[in-house]
Image (spheres, rainbow, N blue to C red):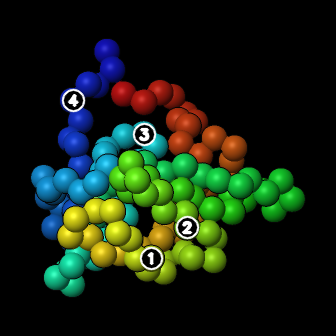
């Protein structure tokens, strides 16, 4: 039977403990990935948000951007050139910026970036 119990947020890589504080549209799921955010006080915290890989380039076999759903009012687009740079955000209380991910790490080099290649999600 498929696993139905999931934590709602991601594991904080610095302490390996579950972060129970929510932010905007943070969610744990197959198409969610964790990003580093900077809080208004200057500290950093990891939150998981839905990611959608965008603009597939057939010539290079690469995704050109990733859209991160931060809130119902804000989707952050991170271009390939934005990898590991910090982008200002406004829709999440207490969060002032998000670090854009490396698109190849998040999306890979296939047309189904979040598909389970060898088996099934459980």
User: Disc 3 or 1, which lies upstream in sequence?
Assistant: 3
Residue drawn at x 57%, y 76% as measured from the top left: 82
Question: Is 117 rendered above or below residue 88?
Answer: above
User: Disc 1 or 2, which lies upstream in sequence?
Assistant: 2
Question: Is 83 rendered above or below residue 104?
Answer: below
Crowdedness near tag 2: few (<14), some (14–19) or many (≥20) residues, C-alpha within 10 Å: many
Tell us which disc is closer to us: 2 or 3. 2
Residue drawn at x 16%, y 82% as measured from the top left: 41
Q: CA distance from mark 4 to mark 1?
A: 33 Å
- Could you tell me if the residues under marks 4 and 3 are in contact, i.e. CB atoms within 8 Å? no
Q: Which mark is residue 78?
A: 2
Note whether residue 31 is visible: yes
Residue drawn at x 22%, y 65% as measured from the top left: 93
Question: Is 52 rendered above or below residue 119?
Answer: below
Q: Which mark is residue 55?
A: none
- Could you tell me if the residues under marks 3 and 1 are in contact, i.e. CB atoms within 8 Å? no
Q: Which mark is residue 30?
A: 3
Tell us which disc is closer to us: 2 or 4. 2
User: Disc 4 or 3, which lies upstream in sequence?
Assistant: 4
Give the percent coordinates (x, y) of residue 20.
13, 52
In the displayed structure image, the side of residue 72 where residue 46 appears, left or right = left
Give the percent coordinates (x, y) of residue 8.
22, 43
Which quarter of the figure has residue 36? Answer: bottom left
Q: CA distance from mark 3 to mark 1?
A: 24 Å
Note whether residue 49 is visible: no
Q: CA distance from mark 4 to mark 3?
A: 13 Å
Q: Which residue is mark 4?
A: 5
Give the percent coordinates (x, y) of residue 94.
20, 70
Q: Which residue is mark 1?
A: 87
Residue drawn at x 40%, y 53% as measured from the top left: 73
Q: CA distance from mark 1 to mark 2?
A: 8 Å
């Amino acid at each position: 039977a498929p696993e139905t119990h999931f934590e709602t947020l991601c594991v904080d890589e610095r302490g390996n403990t579950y972060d129970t504080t929510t932010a905007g549209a943070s969610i744990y799921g197959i198409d969610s990935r964790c990003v580093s955010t900077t809080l208004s006080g200057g500290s950093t915290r990891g939150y998981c948000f839905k990611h959608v890989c965008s603009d597939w380039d057939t010539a290079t076999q690469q995704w050109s951007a990733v859209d991160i759903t931060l809130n119902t009012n804000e989707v952050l687009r991170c271009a390939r050139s934005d990898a590991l740079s910090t982008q200002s955000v406004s829709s999440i209380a207490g969060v002032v910026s998000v670090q854009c991910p490396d698109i190849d790490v998040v999306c890979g080099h296939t047309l189904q970036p979040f598909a389970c290649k060898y088996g099934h999600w459980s």
